[in-house]
Amino acid sequence: TNHKPMVDWDVWIRHDIQLLRDAGVLQDEIAADTFAGSHEEYQAWRRYLGNRHNSQHVVGRGLYAIQLQHYYQVLRRAHKPASDLLVLRSDQLRRDTHAVVQQVTTDFLGLPPHPLPDASARHETSGPNNSSSSSNGMPMPDDIRRELQQLFRPYNQRLFRLLNWTTDG
């Protein structure tokens, strides 16, 4: 059967990238090391989130470094340690669900250990590298994938530095 994709990747993704540019989140004018974490970046982020033409923020939601940096600033202003915020890696959750859940419940929350049912089937996804399709099974075009990888690379590097993570998990 020939069916029309539910997602027009090109329009959906590129529209949000343009909104990020229009708001000033994606910067060509200011050097990345100067802009990252600055008040100007925060203001650009607020403009992006306030855009009423984009309720989904499909690309911006993945810029975790920006969001996390602002949470850390709020914690500092409240005189709270950064360790009050737990950030988990989805790849570790998929790889070792029980260990991550135990980390959250016993180590972070201080709750007693609790046996968990097998959750391995809940983390199965389809496609090569578990990322070739949207949740509705529509394939993402290669050019969009490459554009997103290029866009996210510096933000992911920044996130890993912020969290002192290595790329090997």
Image: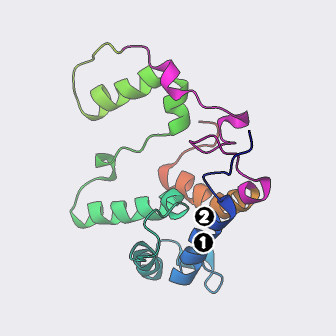
Q: How many marks?
A: 2
Q: Where does the magenta region start and end?
A: 117-145
Choose between 3 and 153: the one closer to the eye: 3
Residue at image coords 29%, 65% = 74
Q: Position of residue 168 (x, y in %)?
A: 64, 37
Residue at image coords 41%, 81% = 43
Badge 1: few (under 14), some or many (20 or more) residues near its Cα, within 10 Å? some
Display coloring: rainbow
Q: Which quadrant, please, contains the C terminus?
A: top right
Query: Does 166 sit above or below residue 37?
Result: above
Which residue is denoted by mark 2 in the rendering?
12
Choose between 9 and 25: the one closer to the eye: 9
Q: Is residue 46 left or right of residue 158?
A: left
Give the CA distance from mark 1 to mark 2: 5 Å
Cβ atoms under marks 1 and 2 closer than 8 Å? yes
Q: Where on the picture, by quarter, is residue 110?
A: top left
Choose between 164 and 87: the one closer to the eye: 87
Report the magenta stretch's main SS: loop
Q: Position of residue 85 (x, y in %)?
A: 32, 48
Q: Which quadrant, please, contains the N terminus?
A: top right
Residue at image coords 56%, 35% = 91
Secondary structure type for disc 2: helix
Which residue is denoted by mark 1 in the rendering?
15
Magenta includes 67? no
Q: In the image, what residue type sits under mark 1? A: His
